[in-house]
Image: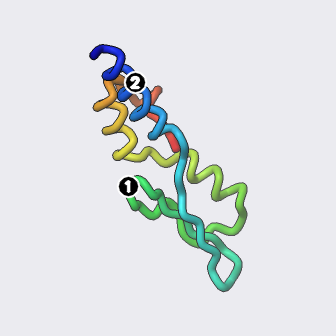
């Protein structure tokens, strides 16, 4: 029984490690991005993919933080998963 709980916890933790974003390109060539976990619009009208990557990397997803808490991981400002 302990092994099943451990495997389920690992599965939940691994499920929340991959960043998932929906990127769209506007008619003027700029980009929008939305977090697919919390459905928050992370950025709009971003001009380069480098800037888009930077903005996405600074997004703190509340859904991912909650999943980490449920999986038994302590979430602090320093080790909160940024997607």
Q: How many marks?
A: 2
Please name which of the two marks, 1 or 2, marks the residue nearer to the observer: 2
The crowd level at tag 1 (other Cα within 10 Å; few <14, some 14-19, many 20+) is few
- Evaluate if marks 1 and 2 touch, with contact meaning CB atoms under 8 Å apart: no
- Counting from the top left corner in percent of width and height, residue 83 is at 52, 44
Q: Which residue in the protein does label 1 denote?
A: 38
How is this picture coloured? rainbow
As helix, strand or loop, the secondary structure at mark 2 comes to helix
Q: In which quarter of the image is the N terminus?
A: top left
Q: Residue at point 41% right, 47% down?
A: 61
As helix, strand or loop, the secondary structure at mark 1 comes to loop
Towards the viewer: 83 or 51? 83
Towards the viewer: 10 or 60? 10
Q: Residue at point 64% right, 75% down?
A: 25
Label drawn at residue 7: 2
**Relative to residue 77, is residue 20 depicted above or below?**
below
- Counting from the top left corner in percent of width and height, residue 6 is at 36, 20
Mark before the other along the chain sequence, 1 or 2? 2
Would you identify the image quadrant in which residue 22 lies?
bottom right
Would you identify the image quadrant in which residue 65 lies?
top left
Q: Residue at point 54% right, 69% down?
A: 44
- Counting from the top left corner in percent of width and height, residue 48 is at 72, 64
Q: Is residue 81 left or right of residue 68?
A: right
How far apart in space, not on screen, are marks 1 and 2 (Cα)? 25 Å
The crowd level at tag 2 (other Cα within 10 Å; few <14, some 14-19, many 20+) is few
**Relative to residue 66, is residue 61 depicted above or below?**
below
Q: Residue at point 51% right, 38% down?
A: 17
Label drawn at residue 48: none
């Amino acid at each position: 029984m302990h092994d099943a709980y451990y495997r389920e916890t690992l599965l939940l933790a691994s499920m929340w490690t991959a960043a998932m974003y929906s990127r769209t390109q506007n008619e003027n060539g700029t980009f929008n991005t939305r977090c697919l976990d919390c459905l928050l619009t992370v950025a709009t009208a971003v001009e380069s993919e480098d800037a888009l990557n930077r903005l996405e990397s600074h997004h703190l997803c509340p859904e991912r933080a909650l999943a980490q808490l449920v999986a038994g991981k302590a979430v602090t400002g320093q080790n909160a998963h940024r997607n």
